[in-house]
Amino acid sequence: MSKEAVIVAIAGGGSTFTPGIVNALLSGLDRFPVVEIRLYDIDGSRVELMGGLIKRIIEISKALIKVMVTTDGKEAFTGVDFVFSQIRAGGLKMREVDEKIPLKYGAIGQETCGAGGFSYGFRTMKAFIPLVKMIYSYAPDAWILNYTNPESIVAEIIRRTFPKAKIINACDMTISLEETMAENLGYNRDDFVPEYYGLNHFGWYRKIYDKSLQRDILPEILEKISGKGLELHEFQADDESWQATYKMLGRMIADFPGYFPNSYFEYYLYSDQVLAKSDKNYTRANEVMDSRERDVYSLAREIQENPMTPIPKAEKSKHGQYIVDMAVSILNDSHDRFLLIVPNEGSIENVRSDAVVEVPAYVGATGVESITMGKIPDFHKGLIEAQCAAEKLLVDAFVEQDYYKALQAFTLNQAVPSATVAKKCLDEFIIANGDYWPELHK
Ligand code: G6P
Ligand code: MN
């Protein structure tokens, strides 16, 4: 891999997150010299439109970066150094289906949690494995930095299918949590050394050492936000759903003191409350389609009609920044610390070693080195082990095409209230997903 001229491909290039990633790449060119960005997507018209927007962003920045837009895997991945993957199998239309079917039966309707997350899990596994095989057939030495949801399930199938592959699984939720803590309470996130453990979207902070204050600041953070929660002031500030989620943290911390939970626990621990305020006919997918998706694509269409269209202030997303920071750490072998989704292998001592956990890890030219977290409390261990078993059963069901394992997985999921509901969701998802899912045999 050349350190002077890096080629990056974005799989799922048509995603509305692509501009944020490109802006993060543009702001980090001194550390990460990208000469070519390839946008790969199976949806040709979408990625074409996105390509126009990305070319305009790069033109305005005056950076000398070539942009390729393609639906052809050979073209996209041949000779590439890094692949950033953020595919969404079935698009937002299927996210809507994932969210709405469980709601019909009184269960949480959510992108990565509960029955909907498992529906998405099957779809993603079916799309992601051939994608990885294709990437390595054209670029055997490439690094894949993976953000593809639902990440716990994706990371588990990767652990089984490509145990030696150069794939790093990461999620931006913890960055958003940390940045919001820092912004609300007057800390600097760059000074944070967090201790966090769990599964993806399913973990807790037990310590946040602040390098400049030279102490663990988690106790004071918990005290300040217990019962109150956090507020988003910049990124997503006008998004009521995310505001409600950040507020809910206050309730969770008041009820279960001593640790800072991932916000996604609202769907598992307070599903009754989330359900009470859910609209069966208008879910998060509809909100996203009517906001981010609409805004980004209307701008892309304007640019297609008038290439000189001005672009609002370039935002680099947290998601984009994190992915670029990881790539920099690999390229420069700098061993920076991240929270990553890795095979447990003893990191959390009292959780099964073949779990895929989210823990602190250092990233360098040879990959990821996670740290040892020791033992965790029973409340966390119990939740983790049940969720992990449910996810493993889902992956077994996928590999073995076994309906009954799928039903076990759905039933064990802690956001699914009963086997009755699990079966209703599973049976309806089989029909709704059609060829997006593997065939399941009884
Ligand atoms: C966070 C999570 C992602 C998830 C996203 C959903 O960033 O880490 O895994 O996909 O939230 O956000 P949205 O605005 O699409 O509901
Ligand atoms: Mn995530």
Image (cartoon, rainbow, N blue to C red):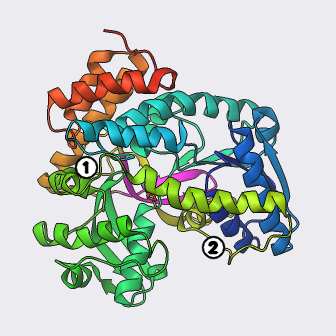
Residue for point 26% across, 17% down: 404
- Would you say residue 248 is visible in this rendering? yes
As displayed, is residue 290 above or below residue 90? below
Residue 212 screen position, x and y as percent: 42, 89
Residue 116 screen position, x and y as percent: 35, 39
Residue 389 screen position, x and y as percent: 26, 34
Mark 2 element type: loop
Residue for point 30% across, 58% down: 373
Which amino acid is tagged 2? Glu
Q: Quadrant of residue 258?
A: bottom left
Residue found at the very far top of the displayed protein: 442
Ligand 1's image quarter is bottom left
Residue for point 38% across, 15% down: 440
In this view of the protein, which residue sits in the foreground, 154 or 439?
439
Check if mark 2's residue and mark 1's residue have beta carbons within 8 Å. no
Label 1 within 8 A of ligand 2 by Cβ: no
Q: Which residue position is annotated with label 1?
A: 349
Magenta highlight: main SS: strand
Disc sitting over residue 260 in the figure: none
In this view of the protein, which residue sits in the foreground, 274 or 412?
274
Disc sitting over residue 315 in the figure: 2
Which amino acid is tagged 1? Glu
Q: Quadrant of residue 186?
A: bottom left
The stretch in magenta equals 357-371
Residue for point 40% across, 77% down: 232
- Would you say residue 380 is visible in this rendering? no
In this view of the protein, which residue sits in the foreground, 54 or 377?
54
Looking at the rendering, in which quadrant would you find the C terminus?
A: top left
